[in-house]
Image: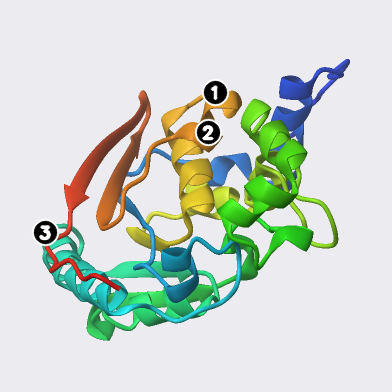
């Protein structure tokens, strides 16, 4: 017998989002099969160390040390679970270089997608935060006041809410997947994914704490999602 979902008078934001989700997802593919989703930021890159917004720079020496530590961590984590893992990452150099430290015989599938790129900086890409404070204080104030909806000006500029919508296809795929998954992503993307699976209010997503060299392990289940943090062991570098 066929199945169908009927929706009537769904005019508010949350009901409309639920209906939209069901329209693009086979609801019977959504499951509570035990699985792990590991979220981690790439190691530090040269722009990040200088406090520059955006850009596509390579890892620093410390970034390579963190990536190596991630490889060691994942080797143990994968063996303790299903023995294999899917790896998702953005095409940014720092993410690609971080992924190189993951043993390929543990990887069943690698997905590289721009959907996992950091929030777009628009016209402000290439500026340091100190320069933005000095030259565009009104924008800095506006972002601090409403970090969820503030959108960087210019072509490619995004807000956190834009990023949340951009990540919807990724979230749908993760809801469908039964394999364990490692996601190497920027701080903004990590916050959005962690916020979704842990049920954090959207207003709080841009303020979720993330740490350098920390792996967040998510274990979705029927009653929500358990979360653990693992500090990678690496030697700190002064860049």
Task: Tell me if mark 2 has few (under 14), some (14-19) or many (20+) residues whose alpha carbon lies within 10 angstroms of its own.
Answer: many
Q: Secondary structure at mark 3?
A: helix
Most extreme residue toward the front is: 134
Q: Residues under labels 1 and 2: Cα distance?
A: 7 Å
Query: From the image, which quarter does the N terminus lie in?
Result: top right
Residue at 55%, 55% (x, y): give it. 173
108 is higher (above) or lower (below) than 186: below
Q: Marks 1 and 2: CB-CB under 8 Å?
A: yes
Q: Earlier in the sequence, mark 3 or mark 2?
A: 3
Residue wearing tag 2: 205
Q: Secondary structure at mark 2?
A: helix
How far across and how far down the image is residue 213, in percent? 26, 58
Residue at 34%, 68% (x, y): give it. 43
Residue wearing tag 3: 80
Q: Marks 3 and 2: CB-CB under 8 Å?
A: no
146 is higher (above) or lower (below) than 42: above
* Count of numbered tags: 3
Residue wearing tag 1: 201
1 is higher (above) or lower (below) than 58: above
33 lies left or right of 185: left
How far across and how far down the image is residue 136, in percent? 75, 47
How far across and how far down the image is residue 24, in percent? 72, 47
Residues 1 and 224: in front is 224
């Amino acid at each position: 017998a066929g199945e169908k979902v009927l929706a009537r008078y769904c005019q508010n934001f949350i009901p409309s989002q639920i209906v939209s989700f069901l329209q693009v997802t086979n609801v019977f593919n959504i499951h509570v099969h035990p699985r792990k989703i590991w979220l981690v930021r790439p190691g530090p890159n040269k722009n990040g160390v200088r406090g520059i917004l955006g850009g596509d720079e390579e890892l620093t020496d410390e970034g390579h040390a963190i990536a190596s530590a991630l490889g060691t961590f994942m080797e143990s984590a994968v063996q303790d679970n299903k023995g294999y893992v899917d790896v998702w990452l953005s095409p940014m150099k720092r993410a690609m270089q971080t992924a190189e430290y993951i043993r390929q015989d543990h990887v069943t599938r690698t997905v590289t997608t721009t959907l996992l790129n950091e929030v777009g900086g628009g016209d402000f890409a290439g500026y340091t935060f100190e320069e933005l404070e000095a030259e565009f204080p009104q924008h800095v104030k506006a972002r601090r006041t409403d970090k969820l909806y503030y959108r960087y000006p210019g072509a490619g500029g995004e807000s956190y809410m834009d990023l949340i919508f951009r990540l919807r296809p990724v979230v749908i795929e993760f809801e469908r997947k039964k394999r364990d998954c490692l996601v190497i992503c920027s701080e903004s993307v990590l916050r959005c994914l962690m916020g979704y699976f842990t049920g954090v209010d959207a207003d709080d997503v841009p303020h979720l704490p993330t740490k350098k060299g920390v792996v967040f392990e998510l274990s979705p289940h029927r009653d929500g999602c358990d979360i653990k943090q693992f500090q990678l062991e690496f030697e700190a570098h002064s860049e």
